[in-house]
Image (cartoon, rainbow, N blue to C red):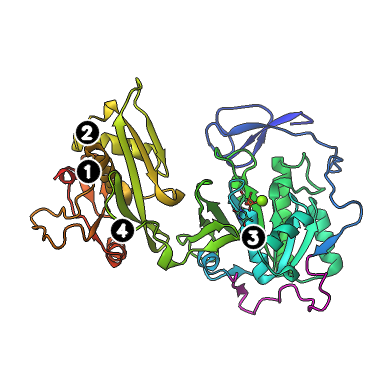
Amino acid sequence: MKNKETVFVCSNCGNEFGKWAGQCSGCGEWNSLKEVSNKFGGNGKSKNKIKMGGEKLEIVNLGDFDKNKEQTRGSVPTNSGIFSTGISEFDRVLGKGIVQGSAVLFSGEPGIGKSTLLTQLIGKIGGLYVAGEESAEQIGLRVKRLGLNANNFDILGTNSIDELEEFLDRTQKLYKIAVVDSIQVMNCENATGVIGSVSQIKESTFRLIQIAKKKGMAIFIVGHVTKDGDIAGPKLLEHMVDTVLYFEGEKNGDLRILRTSKNRFGPTDEVGVFKMEEKGLREIKSEEINLIENGENKIGSAVTVVMEGTRPMMLEIQALVVESFAPMPKRIFSGIDYNRGQLMVAIAQKSLGIPLYKYDVFLSVTGGVKIEETAADLAVLAAMWSSYKNLPLNPNLSPGKPVSPLNKGRSLPVYIGEASLLGEVRKVRNLEKRKKEAESLGRKLVEVRNVKELKT
Ligand code: TYD
Ligand code: MG
């Protein structure tokens, strides 16, 4: 690997190779080697650095216009070492709150709202914003637009970890938290490669973790991921940090979900739910988590309850099943895993007898949520059946139970269940909790043992 223009880097483990190979000999992953440019700038002293803010290191505090305010930017955490984010949905995901001196990788697709949420976090508890991507002015504008407390912000415009460290040492300021936005544009002098290269990202993260430990300051490291988990994505950083958060959602929907895939200090099964609005991200509390309009039974629509962390969340699934004019019928799903959707199409064909080989199937989930549970299977099938038959779903499907005319049209159905390949309906975890949620909103669980019963 000596002075080559490009190297091949494994997107899974970060090992570098001089030649391409189908399998990474470091971690055994297939097809994970990607070619990246790797212009070495000599022994550690690379010249191709971006410097922001000129020669002198400038710190901008957005509140400095107002001289009368006290000078603390976030008090030192209590002796328990855990402090609240001030945003309850955020606390929920982290466990209890932010752990002093921890390193948190905050990842998500570009434009999803990472900078927005972390800006709001600093607005709440105060801290340092290391702006690598945007200028201090841009962040200032955002702070203003979001109506946050400008005094809480210290903004350091830099792409250099060395500058950040020097700044912290020189000023001896104590921050509760620092946000580094983003790791893809940071570099440090003791690493080779250009900004954004694997070696720079790895070394920068390593240095940030050291700084966090040394200063007892929690650091949120922003990392972009692309749809195909592109090179130098935060994947290889996951091993290094204490906590990995994912911020996700469909970009054209306004719902955002914060998940954790690794947490050294708390659970990994809780999620935080937010809505992107005019004034930034708003927390969605349990009471308003259900994303359905209570109304009549529509054709091609079925309601289900999924678990978001430990909370049930009601969702509507819509299906459009129409005769196809294409040689290959279309399967277009949004919010539903493609393979799972294909399987549902096959089950519908076999168990419900819909000749789907000549029908296009479109499926979507309300609110731009991605369903990752099999509990929604039954609702997907029911919605397809409803669309195919051009009839709304019958709310009183329990076989053997006569339908009281009074009840008719009153309690709307909810479909919860996993479908097996044979069309059997399996019970799902937390069924009672889901059922209760649905009932509290005037919905009735449709109890079927086989997908076939949807036809009755
Ligand atoms: P941003 O936080 O910049 O995304 P990221 O840092 O993950 O790349 O969010 C960008 C999007 O959020 C942008 O498309 C506009 C939208 N947005 C709002 O809808 N409302 C707001 O108050 C803000 C600040 C952003
Ligand atoms: Mg951003």
Q: Using the image as rendered, state which of residue 346 and residue 2 is in the foreground.
A: 346
Label 1 beta carbon within 8 A of ligand 1: no
3 or 1: tag closer to the N-terminus: 3
Q: Are marks 2 and 3 in contact (CB under 8 Å)?
A: no
Q: Residues within 10 Å of mark 1 (few under 14, many from 20)?
A: some
Mark 1 against mark 4, which lies toward the viewer?
1
1 or 4: tag closer to the N-terminus: 1
Q: Determine the CA span between mark 2 and mark 3.
A: 48 Å
Q: Determine the CA span between mark 2 and mark 1.
A: 14 Å
From where the camera sits, is residue 239 visible? no
Label 3 beta carbon within 8 A of ligand 1: yes
Q: Residues within 10 Å of mark 2 (few under 14, many from 20)?
A: some
In the rendered structure, which amino acid carries the disc numbered 3? Leu
Q: Is residue 90 left or right of residue 428?
A: right
Q: Determine the CA span between mark 3 and mark 1.
A: 46 Å
In the rendered structure, which amino acid carries the disc numbered 2? Ile
Name the residue carrying label 1. 391
Name the residue carrying label 4. 429
Question: Tag 4, which secondary structure?
Answer: loop
Q: Which mark is residue 354?
A: 2
Q: Is residue 98 left or right of residue 410?
A: right
Q: Are marks 3 and 4 in contact (CB under 8 Å)?
A: no
Q: Which mark is residue 226?
A: none
Quadrant where the C terminus lies?
A: top left
Question: Tag 2, which secondary structure?
Answer: loop
Quadrant where the N terminus lies?
A: top right
2 or 4: tag closer to the N-terminus: 2
Tell me the quarter of the picture where residue 231 sits. Answer: top right
Start-end of magenta stretch: 62-86
